[in-house]
Amino acid sequence: MSRLLRPAIASVAAGAALLLLSGCVANAPTADAGHTGIGVDSSADACTIDTASAPSGNVRFTVKNSGTQVTEFYLLADDGLRIVGEVENVGPGISRDLVIQARPGDYFTVCKPGMVGAGIGKAAFTVTDSGHDFEADADLTAQVAAANLNYAAYVKDQIAQLVTGTDAFAAAYTAGNDEEARALYAPTRVHWERVETVAESFGDLDPMLDLREADLEEGQEWTGWHAMEKDLWPANAEAGFAAYTPEQRQALADKLVADTATLNDKVQNLDFTLDMQTNGAIGLMDEVASGKVTGEEEFWSHTDLWDFQANVDGATVLYGGVRDILLAKDADLAAKLDREFAALQKLLDAQRVGDGFKLYTELSPAEIRAFSDQVNALGEPLNQLTAALVLN
């Protein structure tokens, strides 16, 4: 599981090579003709930001990790729940950028050392109206509108298929047809994983549907796919694990079906922006780097490669939607992204078995290393995508 998204802002996690304010902490924000630069320091016990406001337009947060754990930085909507933009996997001593097309409004900033829990240093952040014209390029606006329309249709189609698959999975699970439920598990979750960053934009729906046991907080109720995964693959659970009762199964299945139906309702009227597409692609590949390539996502079923492929599918669709725009702005970056996406897909294709994939536990250390290296190779140019489209 992970997160991302929001309307009205665009973000991107750009690599260290793009840093404008690396190490700039507790200093005044800077501004040039293209954007406002703001430094953020994420330490073990604080989330320090240069300023609590910025003018509308392009804003680049440069997030430096001065702590000892991998950290994340979020820009949240005015409800403090929905994620507008984020940068993940910022290692100790490392800086990464979050570039946004900030529209006027109220937001919150927060850091999350260790990448678990509610985060620390949550603070109000205001974007004032500078009069910035977000629609200045009519041709670009038309291209973006077409791409956004196509992506909205893709999201609705994937969630509709998720609803259908979830209904069938839940029916098999509650009826005790474990073999059928196990067979439906990975192919159904594919539809979630392809649009995961969109689904994660709806506050509590993501943890209710996709929380892993390792990420549970004290007192938190565990529901969703992975609670049922553990019950369906008990041989891989810890010693003493007790299978769920029929009543527990019914409650989990009912909630999964209801939460998925809620998700379906919420995606019907979504509007997307250029940044939402590019940030979505980056977010999906961050999901691969933090959960799939490590084999942590599907801890009991070991069906991580299904999720891996689905994240890549979604990122490919998102990149494809803006590729023509990128070709006009930075053809070299487009060519590099084409090569790296193709190389990653080649590695995945080598692990196919029938309609699915090998279990993650069947991969050799060399094969896992090859996946990790290629995810990193793709991540470097992908992290430049939003900046290339927004700041150029």
Image (spheres, helix red, strand yellow):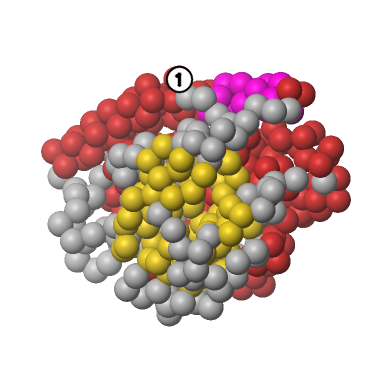
In-image side of 253 versus 62 (left or right) = left
Task: Magenta stretch: give its range.
Answer: 140-155
15 in relation to 203, above or below: below
Query: Element at badge 1?
Result: helix
Instruction: Name the main secondary structure of what is drawn in magenta.
Output: helix
- Give the total number of marks visible in the rendering: 1
In-image side of 274 versus 143 (left or right) = left
Q: Identify the residue at horizontal 36%, vertical 75% (top origin).
A: 44
In this view of the protein, which residue sits in the foreground, 294 or 334?
Answer: 334
In this view of the protein, which residue sits in the foreground, 199 or 101?
Answer: 101
Q: Identify the residue at horizontal 73%, vertical 28% (top origin).
A: 137
In this view of the protein, which residue sits in the foreground, 109 or 145?
Answer: 109
- Please provide percent x and percent y for residue 85: 49, 47
- Please provide percent x and percent y for residue 30: 58, 59
Estimate how packed mark 1 is, as few (under 14), some (14 to 19) or many (20 or more) residues with alpha carbons within 10 Å: few
Q: Quadrant of residue 321?
A: top right
Please indicate, yes or no, whether residue 208 appears anywhere in the rendered image.
yes
Report the quarter where the C terminus lies.
top right
Please indicate, yes or no, whether residue 351 appears anywhere in the rendered image.
no
115 in relation to 2, above or below: below
In this view of the protein, which residue sits in the foreground, 233 or 314?
Answer: 314
- Please provide percent x and percent y for residue 146: 68, 21
- Please provide percent x and percent y for residue 51: 44, 58
* Residue 142 is covered by the magenta coloring: yes
Q: Amino acid at mark 1?
A: Asn
* Residue 7 is covered by the magenta coloring: no
48 in relation to 86, above or below: below
Q: Identify the residue at horizontal 44%, vertical 50% (top origin).
A: 53
Residue named by callout 1: 269
